Image (tube, grey):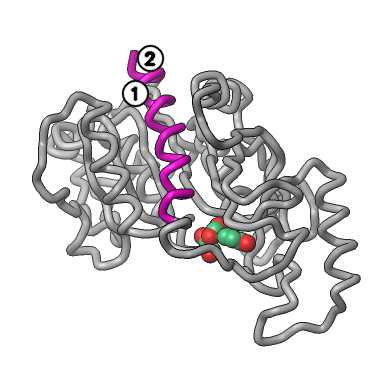
């Protein structure tokens, strides 16, 4: 069993810490006992783009976790007005918005929360949607290495005026653990492990030609997507580089499980119906449910 230590010596000198976007005030000096009581049992933190999906995940996980409760899940951080947080036994389901910038804000605060609450062996998961690269819509992809929009296997962003590059990959035991329990012959969909490209822009950054601005040709786009495919990239989303690198720096295990809404080799528009999208979005739920059951055994 190991506690989440993180990687910031300044935290040890703070007498209180206001997790501003979650609207949680931690009194570090009093040994954070109230935070420990409320969140100390957390073992898995599931994150995903929207509040609605995270609420649905919380409801989905109840019977799996043996929790008999038909009430409406309560958003514990509603007062923060930014991110929704639902607690189901030892699992938190948290919305993160679109892209690394919104996700990194809540991820820093969640990482600190698990440290203050003295949670043991916490695993962070992202349950998301993505564009597939050469895979059927509906395929579930578990990320191994994450590439940025320049097709480099790093997360790069400015700190103190310098561009910092951090390794971006997920722990092999988490990837194999998810695949090991997630992959079942009875399923009507495929689950694969592959590399993921994470971009800062849904349109130009992902090589779409249907954004408000586009200064390249369809041919340029296809060459870029082919280059990505050659690197073993089978899906494109907007968070995996930041998510893998920040959790790695904080020394916390993480995994990223996304369902492809389309195959980008066939087009740019997401044309599936909302009903189909909803059915596709249940697929990572099934995989995550199995993985959580395995983790908590
Ligand atoms: C996938 O879907 C969102 C964009 O539509 C983004 O959060 C992502 O990574
Ligand atoms: N999310 C993305 O980031 N890209 C897609 O193509 C679909 C979902």
Query: Gap between marks 2 and 1, in whole Å?
Result: 6 Å
Whereabouts is ligand 2, in terms of quadrant? bottom right
Residue 278 on image: x %, y %? 41, 54
Discs 2, 1 touching: Cβ within 8 Å = yes
**Of callouts 2 and 1, the N-terminal one:** 2
| 131 relative to 183, above or below | below
Question: Residue at left 21%, top 47%?
Answer: 26
| 287 relative to 8, above or below | above
Identify the main secondary structure in magenta. Answer: helix
Question: Residue at left 28%, top 35%?
Answer: 61
User: Does residue 289 show up magenta in the picture?
Assistant: yes
Q: Which residue is mark 2?
A: 1
Q: Magenta part of the protein: which range? A: 278-297
Is 231 positioned to the left or the right of 83 in the image? right
Question: Residue at left 67%, top 52%?
Answer: 132
User: Does residue 61 show up magenta in the picture?
Assistant: no
| 174 relative to 6, above or below | above
| 77 relative to 177, above or below | below
Q: Nearer the viewer, residue 75 or 234?
A: 234
Question: Residue at left 52%, top 39%?
Answer: 247
Name the quarter where the C terminus is drawn: top left
Q: Which residue is mark 1?
A: 120
Residue 15 on image: x %, y %? 24, 46
Q: Secondary structure at mark 2?
A: loop
Is 296 positioned to the left or the right of 251 in the image? left
- Of the numbered discs in the image, which one, if any, rests on residue 206? none
Residue 151 on image: x %, y %? 80, 54
- Asked if residue 178 shows in the view, the reply is yes
Name the quarter where the N terminus is drawn: top left
């Amino acid at each position: 069993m190991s506690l989440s230590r993180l990687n910031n010596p300044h935290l040890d000198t703070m007498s209180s810490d206001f997790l501003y976007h979650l609207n949680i005030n931690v009194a570090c000096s009093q040994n954070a006992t109230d935070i420990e009581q409320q969140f100390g049992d957390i073992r898995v933190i599931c994150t995903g783009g929207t509040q609605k999906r995270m609420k649905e995940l919380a409801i989905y996980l109840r019977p799996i976790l043996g929790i008999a409760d038909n009430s409406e899940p309560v958003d514990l951080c509603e007062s923060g007005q930014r991110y929704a947080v639902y607690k189901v036994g030892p699992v938190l389901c948290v919305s993160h918005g679109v892209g690394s910038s919104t996700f990194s804000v809540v991820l820093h605060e969640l990482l600190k929360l698990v440290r203050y609450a003295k949670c043991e062996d916490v695993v962070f998961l992202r349950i998301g949607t993505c564009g597939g690269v050469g895979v059927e819509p509906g395929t579930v992809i578990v990320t191994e290495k994450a590439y940025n929009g320049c097709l480099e296997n790093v997360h790069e962003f400015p700190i103190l005026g310098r561009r910092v590059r951090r390794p971006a990959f997920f722990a092999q035991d988490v990837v194999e653990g998810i695949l090991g329990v997630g992959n079942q012959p009875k399923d009507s969909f495929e689950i694969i492990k592959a590399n993921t490209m994470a971009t800062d822009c849904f349109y130009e950054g992902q090589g779409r030609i249907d954004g408000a601005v586009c200064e390249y040709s369809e041919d340029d786009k296809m060459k870029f997507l082919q280059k990505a495919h050659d690197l073993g990239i089978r899906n494109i989303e907007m968070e995996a580089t930041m998510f893998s690198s920040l959790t790695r720096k904080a020394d916390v295990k993480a995994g990223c499980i996304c369902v492809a809404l389309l195959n980008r080799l066939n087009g740019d528009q997401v044309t599936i119906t909302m009903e189909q999208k909803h059915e596709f979005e249940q697929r990572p739920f099934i995989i995550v449910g199995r993985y959580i059951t395995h983790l908590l055994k």
